[in-house]
Structures are given as structure tokens and as C-alpha cells.
Amino acid sequence: MSTRPGKNVPAENPSDPTAERAPMTIPRVAEMKANGEPIVMVTAYDFPSAQVVEEAGVDIVLVGDTAAMVVLGHDATTPVGMDEMVMLTQAVRRGLETPLLIGDMPFGSYESSNEQAIANAQRFVKEARVDAVKLERGGASVDRARAIVRSGIPVMGHVGLTPQTATALGGFKAQGRTAETAAKLAEDTLALQSVGCFAVVFEAIPASVAEALMERIEVPIIGIGAGPATDGQVLVFHDMLGMYQGHQPRFVRRYAEVRDEMLKGVSAYAADVRSRSFPDEKHSYSISPEELAEFKRYLEEESLAGTDTPWDW
Ligand code: KIV
């Protein structure tokens, strides 16, 4: 799906994030699995975060429906709709050149029918120029995934803890912790693979279950709370950088404390405005002394207060 021109040069050293890199493709993701190269995936929701993940050299960027929580302030992922997701994805697209871009199909955008699923996947491609879409769950979603793949749009599956149906799963809880539920996970993954999903996300499942499954699955598996055996890892941008104050799942490792820095910055600005130490000369514009003197003469000569309005209606 990637039709962007430009940097189509293989990186000499794929682990050097500053090296010139070829745009990521779906065959390349499969090749990374085959070569045992870890696949780095992260979410992004706007232009500046897209620029950051581009520069950091990640392989796959997901505009996740977690935007509902970490960007829009909802307490679940379900309220976000296609219009919001497309707008966020367009912003990410503008900041991204190299990684594979995936649009996350929000709750209510694909469940009703294959036609609905294809139409909304096409919106992501046409309006936000994604390379692929992601949808949640096995079961009925397998049929939707098949339909989207047949329409020519690559699909990533997502099993385990599927936040769009967290209520039905008993809350935001790890899944596959019994032999029976782990077997269901295996069946869903194999079904998604069989209808042509190019990769599948495993969310919040025991590391040992993921490890046991890895031997049986041909497509790349990207884990989030699924242990180290998966082919790649994904984290939510706002979680890993310490930007989100809501619940932090056990699987999040924080690599920065950006919210603390933002709070420090805005508080310092507020203090400077209140003490009148901002703006100073360095942040102000100047006028020549002659022009200023003339302007002041004008102010003295013309009584501006109470003059008639200059326009004549
Ligand atoms: O919406 C999202 O951010 C996701 C990731 C957690 C995989 O689905």
C-alpha cells in the first residue's frame, strides 16, 4: 500500500536510527520475523509525535483507538469514531515517511457487516493514506478481516485483551490464563492468519502462553504485555513517555517523564507572567527611537479617546 517515493534505500545498519532507511513494507515485516529481527511498533496520534517516532526509527506506527483515552480523555476506547480516527491519522501521516502506518478500526466501524468494514477501511486508505488497518478479536471479526483483505487492504489482527470488548471480558484483565481460554486465543490467531492477516497483536496474555503459541504461528506477532517471545513489541506513546495520568497497565515500562516536564514548563511560564519577568527584551520587537518619538507626538496631538468611529456606516 506504500506508494510514497523517496528514501527507497536499504539502511546499511538497520539498528542505527539515524541511517537512511527504506520505507517499511509488509513483506519487510515478514522478513524481519524470518530473520529474528525484533519489530518495533508504537502508537502516535498527532504530527509532532509522528515526527518523533519517525526520527527514533520505529518500524510500525499505529494510530490506536487508545486515542479515545490518552488524547481525548474518555475512560474507554469505545467512544471514539471514524471521523476522529481519520483526522488523527491524517496528522500522523503528515509527520511520517518511513514506518508502516496502521489505522485502528474503532468500535462500531466494522462489526455490522463486511460492507461496513470495507467502507471504513477504505476511508483510512483514501483519506489518511494508511498502509494497513487493525481490528480487534477473533470470532465474527475473522470474517470482517477476510473481507477487508480481499478488498486489497492489509489487516493486522488483535487478540487477548481487546479493549473495545473489555466489559464482556470482565474488565481490563489479562486473558488466556486458563487452558481453555488460551486454546481460544490460539484458535482466533490461527483463524486471523488463515484469512490473510499479515500480523497479529497479542495483548495482556501470559508470557508462557505467547511463547508456546509462537512456534505454531507463521505471521509476525506483536506483543503488548505478552512477554519477550513475540516477534515485536508495541507500547502506547503516552504511557511509555509518562504523559498519561490514568491507569498504567502492568506491561508499561516508562522511558521518560514527559508530563512532569510539561508541568514544570507551564508552571514556570505562569510564574513568569505573574511576576512580569516574561516577556523580556529578548522576546519583544523593537522600533527605532525616531519612529517611536513620532508615534508619541501623534498620540499627544490627536485625542484618540472619544473620536468618532473611523468607518462610516
Ligand atoms: O489502540 C491501541 O493503542 C492498541 C495497542 C495497544 C495495540 O490497540
Image: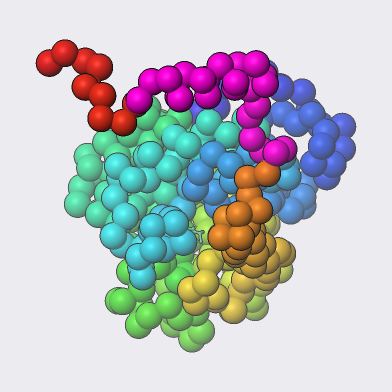
Q: Residue at coordinates 35% horizontally, 25% vertically from top-left?
A: 303
Front residue of this view, candidates 95 and 5: 95
Compared with 228, 23 (above or below) is above
User: Which residue is farthest front?
Assistant: 301
Find residue 162 and report its image quarter: bottom left
Q: Please report the residue visible at 67 percent of the width from the left and 70 percent of the height from the top.
A: 253
Majority secondary structure of magenta residues = helix
The image quadrant that residue 121 belongs to is top left
Residue for point 80% across, 41% down: 17
**Total count of labels:** 0
Image location of residue 190, percent across then percent down: 48, 59
Q: Is residue 40 visible?
A: yes
Residue 235 appears anywhere in the view? no
Where, quadrant-wise, is the C terminus in this rendering? top left
Rendering coords of residue 257 (x, y %): 67, 66
- Front position in the image: 266 or 280: 280
Q: Look at the image and say whether residue 286 sits in the magenta stretch.
A: yes
The colouring scheme, among rainbow, by chain, secondary structure or one colour, is rainbow
Q: Nearer the viewer, residue 131 or 263?
A: 263
Q: How far across and down, in percent of the image, does residue 195 sit? A: 42, 47
Q: What residue span does the magenta drawing correspond to?
A: 281-303
Q: Is residue 301 left or right of residue 219?
A: left
Residue at the limit of the structure toward the left, as seen here: 313
